[in-house]
Image (cartoon, rainbow, N blue to C red):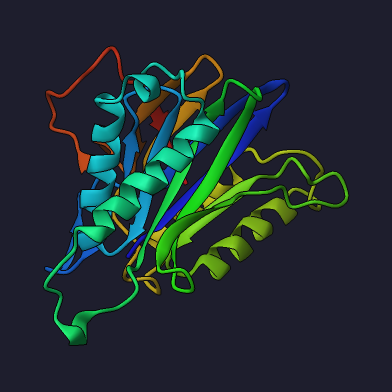
Amino acid sequence: MTLTMAWVRKVGGVEEMVIASDSRLRSLGAWDAAPKILPLPRGDAAIAFAGETDYAYPMMIQVANSISFYHGALTRRQPLAKLKGHLIRVINLMLDQLKDVPANLKEAPAAFFLLAGYDWTSAEFKIWKLHFDASIGRFTFAPARGWGGDGNGEKVLSIIGDDVGEARAVVVEYLQRQGGIRPGAFDMEPMRALAYMVDSERHPSIGGHIQVAKVYKSLQCVPFAVRRNGGRSLLGRPLLDYEESQTIPTMNLDY
């Protein structure tokens, strides 16, 4: 599976959305080059997945296609909150096209998505988890909410994938290292937790290269090249020595 997360980061008066994931697929073995974050062509959001790739990859690609070829979605005339409904309908329509599944293989789709971005109509960063609800036999959504209490309502984080409970506990541990959990939004504590989980040998389904994208209030979704452990990667794939770009920023992760 994987570990994928999105959170609202605030440093000083500057807010941004951060989406991050590992890059491991486990079917042929441990394949550490899988793109799990897809910036959407409208620019104000990204979608990321965790779970079974048989479901997740076709759905995620068709979600992006549906935006590219639907003018209202592509031009952001359809705001992010409305786009979420459109994407759910696209995913469920795809689910309806699945046929000839052997009875012994019929199970609830173990695919999860995060839709994260900036909603220009409410001037807020938003995160929704898109997941299959067995009680209705359809994909639906759940919004990410602040932690609440003691000034922590600004801490907005959603995590999907394997060992989510432990990942949250590691986030809390990094927060507490600052002399107690401070009020206000996250900084890069979730990223540190992701790096810890990627490096831990106790989580064989989580690993490989960390991939990152950010969404800004300027309605831009920007993937980052990641420099870590002496190498560089982009959206989960190691970069070749000659792959330099003036248009892709680099994030140094020394943890």
Task: List the single residue furthest toward the bottom.
Answer: 104
User: As drawn, which residue projects farthest toward the right?
Assistant: 150
Q: Residue at position x 35%, y 29% from top? A: 223
Q: Is residue 39 above or below residue 182?
A: above
Residue 197 higher or lower than 129, as above or below: below
**Residue at the spot 30% in from the left edge and 14% down from the top edge:** 247
Q: Residue at x 36, y 29 (%)?
A: 224
User: Front-most of 249 and 47?
Assistant: 47
Q: Please state the horizontal and vertical placement of residue 30, each as a whole percent of the image.
A: 20, 65
Residues 31 and 73: in front is 73
Q: Is residue 206 left or right of residue 158?
A: left
The reply to whether residue 236 is in sight is no
Q: Tell me residue 74's x, y (percent).
A: 35, 21
Q: Residue at x 32, y 59 (%)?
A: 207
Report the quarter where the N terminus lies: bottom left
Horizontally, residue 251 falls left or right of residue 127, namely: left
Image location of residue 245, percent across then percent down: 23, 17
Foreground of the two, 151 or 117: 117
Residue 196 is situated, as x and y percent measured from the top left of the image, at: 47, 58
Q: Is residue 74 above or below residue 204?
A: above
Quadrant hosting residue 248: top left
Residue 229 left/right relative to 142: left
- The quadrant in which residue 200 appears is bottom left
